């Protein structure tokens, strides 16, 4: 029988990635309900590929790429880059985590991930949350492995700097 | 090479993404540089913190809709005519379908009739909190879309209409959260009515013309998500 829809097995495999898909959307749009809707939209788009979907290939990168694109479109629509002070191009500017860290007690820095620039957030989530390789991350983000490496280093260095004021003197390097 | 040159390599090394000569160079440098060794430890702490945050994000994700796991084996011949319905609300349908109660066991009778029954049952049992926009696709000129807006029961001032492309419009109700989305099919699988119910109880008839065909992509979504069976 000729088919235009992905097989049941393919969709079942894809359903396993639901938390990852919604998690990535949430990190970009910061709204759990909207992230869930974007996740649903990503799955619908996959399903609508029908016979054009190569179910022999891993569906995870496709889903992540799709939901990421949807989330960035959502950010542009909601002008989140203008609304969020964190979303600045200049990575030398203080991020929310730095401002947060500056005003909190030692050990009270929470949610370091949310304090990063959105473009850093997604790279960190793909690496530290989903354990994707640099090559896989580059594929999802549509960039090079060198950019992935640099992005991850900047993000982690920023978190490390934010945590620094809360370390004991003997812990500081 | 200076310490600065080695710093970016520290992250790659922590991730196991540094091989061969580059790894050897970094190891040789770390053996003689306490500052970079301390930096590596600090970055490792940052990674641990970020991993914990990522784990929290994953743990907070809602359960997958049951509809994602089941795809009916459906022949394409079950599809009705390709649609021209300008107000097709695929986004709304996605919300409705994915938030619906578990799909009832397959019923007998024509697939379109089952789809209609499933929708009506879902609408009766559930309130839909999050549908806040309507994407209109199709070769509709702007005046047609604006005419559609004027057909709505709510004042047009409640909506914004943005043209995203020559064939794609985004209609967004301002400050409205629907409490119900009602989709009614006729016996031939065509959308008979698409109604949005506002919190104040007002019904907005988005598509109510008789015998408007079900859009192709909406039909496929219905089939994928389990509303239309394989024998339709």
Image (spheres, coloured by chain):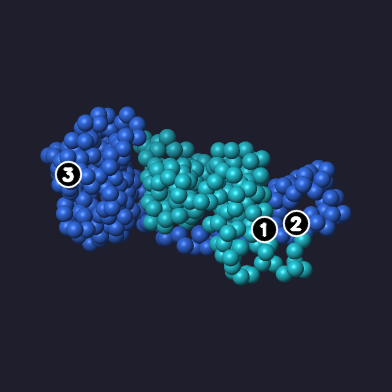
**Separation of marks 2 and 3 at Cα, in angstroms:** 62 Å
* Chain on which label 2 sits: B
Residue at x 45% of width, y 49% of height: A83
Residue B70, percent from left and from top: 37, 52
* Element marked by disc 3: loop
Q: What residue is disc 2 on?
A: B39
Question: In which chain is the residue bearing label 1?
Answer: A
Horizontally, is B110 left or right of A84 in the view? Answer: left
Indicate whether A102 appears above or below B131.
below
The verdict on a common chain for dots 3 and 1 is no
Q: Which residue is mark 3?
A: B152
Q: Colour of chain B?
A: blue
On the image, the x and y values in percent for residue B30 come to 82, 53
- Judge whether residue B127 can be spotted in this image: yes
The answer to whether marks 2 and 1 mark residues whose Cβ atoms lie closer than 8 Å is yes
Q: Earlier in the sequence, mark 2 or mark 3?
A: 2
Q: Quadrant of residue B20?
A: top right
Circles 3 and 1 in contact, beta carbons < 8 Å: no
Residue B197 position within the rendered picture, expressed as x and y whole percent measured from the top left: 20, 54
Q: Chain of mark 3?
A: B
Residue B15 seen in this snapshot: no
User: Color used for chain A?
Assistant: cyan
Q: Residues within 10 Å of mark 1 (few under 14, many from 20)?
A: many
Residue B202, compared with residue A148, is above or below; it is below
The quarter in which the N terminus of chain B is drawn is top right
To which residue does mark 1 refer? A160
């Amino acid at each position: 029988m000729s088919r235009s829809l992905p097989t049941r097995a393919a969709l079942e495999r894809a359903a396993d990635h639901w938390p990852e898909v919604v998690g990535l959307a949430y990190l970009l749009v910061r709204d759990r309900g909207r992230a869930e809707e974007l996740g649903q939209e990503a799955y619908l788009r996959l399903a609508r590929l029908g016979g054009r979907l190569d179910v022999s290939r891993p569906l995870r990168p496709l889903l992540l790429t799709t939901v990421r694109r949807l989330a960035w479109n959502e950010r542009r629509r909601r002008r989140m880059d203008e609304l969020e002070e964190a979303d600045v191009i200049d990575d030398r500017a203080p991020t929310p985590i730095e401002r947060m860290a500056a005003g909190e007690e030692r050990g009270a820095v929470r949610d370091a991930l949310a304090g990063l620039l959105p473009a850093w957030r997604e790279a960190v989530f793909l690496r530290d949350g989903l354990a994707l390789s640099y090559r896989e991350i580059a594929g999802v983000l549509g960039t090079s492995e060198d950019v992935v490496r640099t992005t991850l280093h900047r993000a982690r260095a920023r978190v490390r700097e934010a945590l620094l004021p809360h370390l004991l003197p003997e812990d500081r390097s | 090479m200076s310490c600065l040159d080695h710093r970016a390599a520290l992250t790659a090394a922590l991730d196991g993404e540094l091989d061969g000569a580059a790894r050897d160079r970094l190891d040789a440098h770390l053996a003689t540089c306490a500052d970079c060794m301390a930096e590596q430890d600090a970055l490792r702490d940052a990674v641990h913190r970020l991993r914990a945050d990522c784990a929290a994000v994953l743990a907070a994700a809602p359960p997958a809709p049951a509809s994602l796991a089941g795809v009916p084996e459906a022949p394409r011949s079950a599809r009705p005519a390709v649609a021209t319905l300008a107000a097709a609300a695929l986004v709304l349908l996605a919300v409705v379908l994915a938030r619906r109660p578990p799909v009832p066991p397959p019923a007998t009778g024509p697939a379109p009739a089952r789809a209609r029954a499933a929708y009506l049952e879902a609408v009766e049992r559930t309130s839909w909190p999050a549908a806040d926009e309507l994407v209109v696709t199709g070769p509709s000129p702007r005046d047609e879309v604006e005419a559609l807006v004027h057909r709505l029961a709510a004042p047009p001032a409640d909506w914004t209409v943005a043209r995203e492309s020559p064939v794609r419009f985004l209609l967004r109700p301002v400050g409205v959260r629907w409490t119900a989305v009602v989709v009614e099919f006729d016996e031939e699988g065509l959308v008979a009515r698409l109604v949005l119910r506002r919190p104040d109880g007002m019904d907005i008839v988005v598509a109510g013309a008789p015998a408007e065909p079900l859009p192709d992509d909406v039909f496929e979504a219905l089939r994928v998500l389990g509303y239309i069976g394989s024998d339709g």
